[in-house]
Image (cartoon, coloured by chain):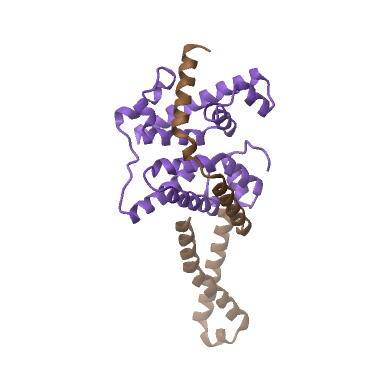
Chain colours: A purple, B brown
Amino acid sequence: MTNEELSDLDLARGVSNGDEEALKSLYDVYADLLFAYIKHLLSEAPRVAVEDIWQETLLSTIRGMSSFRGDSRLFTWMCGIAKRKVADYRRQRKTSINLNCSTAMNNLGYLIDKDVLPEDYVLQQATRRHVVEVLGSIRPKYQKILIQRYINGSSVEEIAKSIGKSYKATESLLSRARQAFKSSFIKLSKEERDE
Amino acid sequence: MNKKDSILENNVQKLLQAGFPDSHKPDPGLRMETYRQLQKQIKRHIPSYEFSNIVLGLLCGLLLLLMTWTGLIVSGDLAKTLNNFPILVMEGILLLNLVSIPISGYLIVKRSRHA
């Protein structure tokens, strides 16, 4: 299995069957995002606690992979395991987490292509966690190019060179990636609001 | 790029930089060590085999049939049954299956909780 665009179910089956290529794909796409997700959930906890929970979550993911049925996105499923581990950690320390943000702030997702988002909204823990969930829900090639461009700060020319495409093709891919991010962001915002 | 695309790009950049900063990524050493642990884990893992519902249904049906049949034989003539080796073997297998049901159930629940 070497196709980087394996579906979540194919990836899960590959890992369940001991396929190392599938494990590598899963790790490359989701491991760092999972770390960020847990770090947002445990923003005030020591880093070593985040690292432990991250490792435990990944191990539980691998062990329980055969039970993944594709009813949700794979990353969403992994986040579910992470939330349970975080809840156990909090229970041991008798603290609680608030997974919700204020309703007023939560309704701003639809503004993503209409107006500049307020800083308060962008910096909220819930929004930042939401961004990680969105990244985990879009296609890996979109995820990769968005990270290269807007987090690593690579130019379009540099990205085009690294992926072996023309400047125009890369710009087009970047545009599709932004649209995918926007759609998923608005969709997940609505789902969270409706919960 | 039109104004809408420009706003979108600006917002996507802000969101990504807030949501996925370097401080929220694992250290490279830890990342590599964790990957190695996962590699060991999948090597140890025995793949599960899916039973179709039809096969499961047939196996349960066969078990019930054998139970009923041996029950009828035993209730008919106990002394003779105990001297009949094939029937004793069949009863032994049935007993083993019956005993393994709660043990398997416990293990399944325990493993799914652990995950």
- The image shows residue A154 at horizontal and vertical percentages of 58, 26
Residue drawn at x 66%, y 29% is: A162
Q: In this view, does B36 lie above or below A152?
A: below
Q: Viewed as shown, does residue A160 lie left or right of B110?
A: right
Q: In this view, does A83 lie above or below B46?
A: above
Q: Viewed as shown, does residue A36 lie left or right of B44?
A: left
- The residue nearer to you, when weighing B17 against B115, is B17
- The image shows residue A104 at horizontal and vertical percentages of 30, 27
Q: In which quarter of the image is residue A26?
A: top right
Q: Quadrant of residue B96?
A: bottom right
Q: In which quarter of the image is residue A123?
A: top left
Q: Is residue A42 above or below residue B88?
A: above
- The image shows residue B32 at horizontal and vertical percentages of 59, 48
- The image shows residue A116 at horizontal and vertical percentages of 40, 19
- The residue nearer to you, when weighing A153 against B8, is A153
Residue drawn at x 52%, y 50% is: A58
Q: In this view, does B64 lie above or below B25?
A: below
Count of numbered tags = 0
- The residue nearer to you, when weighing A100 against A167, is A167
